Amino acid sequence: MKTIDCRGLNCPEPVIRAKEALAKHGSLLVIVDNKTAAENVARMARNNGCQVEMLQKQDNFKLQLKASSKSSPVNEKDADRSRSYLITSKTLGEGPRELGELLLTGFLKTLKEVKPLPEALLFMNQGVKLVTVDDAAAEIIKELPREIDILVCGTCLDYFELTDSLQVGRVSNMYEILETINRTGCVKI
C-alpha cells in the first residue's frame, strides 16, 4: 500500500496530494499532523466513494483509504439542480452597512423557504464572522435544514483567530470549497 506523508503541509495540500495518489493507487495510507487535515482528507475520500479507517490519533493521524468499485456519489441530475452560496461579508450589497446587514439577515431567514434548497453555504473572508462572533446570524444559520452543508474557510478562521469560536458549520478548506463551487453553480452573496 502506498504511503504519503503530508505532515507540515498547509491546507489544502494534504487533500490534493491524497486525491492524486488515490487516483493512481486505489488504496493509500495518509499521514497528517493535525485534526483538521485528517478530517479534510477523510471527507474528500468519503465523497469519492472510499472507505476510511483512522489508524492512529495521537501525535500523527494515519488514515487508511480504500477506493471502492462503486461509482462517484455525485448524481449528475442532482448536481444540475444544486446551488451553493458564497458569503464573503457580513453584509449583502454595496450600500449602507445597516441596510446590508438587514438584507443579509433577510436572505438567511428566507433560505429555508426556497426550493430547491441550496446544497451548501460557503463562508470565507469576513463572512466567517457570521458563524462565529455574530450570535444572531449564527442562530439563524443553525435553524436552516440539515441538508444544507455549511462550509467555513479554515484559513479565514485562523487569520481572524476565530477557530475556537465556530458556532455552526464545519471547518473546510479551499480545495473542498472550490470543488463545491465547480459542482454546484455558486452564487456570490
Image: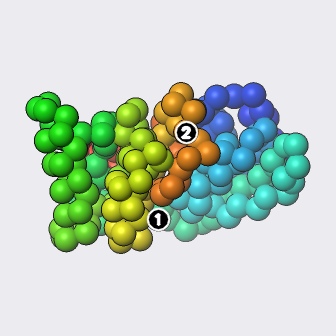
Q: Which residue is mark 2?
A: 162
> Which structural element holds mark 2?
loop
Residue 65 position within the rendered picture, expressed as x and y whole percent measured from the top left: 72, 55
Q: Nearer the viewer, residue 15 or 137?
A: 137
- 44, above or below 12, in the image: below
Nearer to us in this view, 72 or 158: 158
Compare marks 1 and 2 and give the one earlier in the sequence.
Answer: 1
Q: Secondary structure at mark 1?
A: loop
Label pair 1/2, CB-CB below 8 angstroms: no
Residue at 66% across / 45% down in the picture? 36
Q: Residues within 10 Å of mark 1 (few under 14, many from 20)?
A: few
Residue 188 spot, x, y in % from top left:
24, 40
Residue at the spot of label 1: 73
In percent of width and height, residue 27 lies at 73, 53
Q: Could you classify mark 2 by the number of other residues whose Cα lies within 10 Å: few (under 14), some (14-19), or many (20 or more)?
A: some
Q: Amino acid at mark 2?
A: Leu
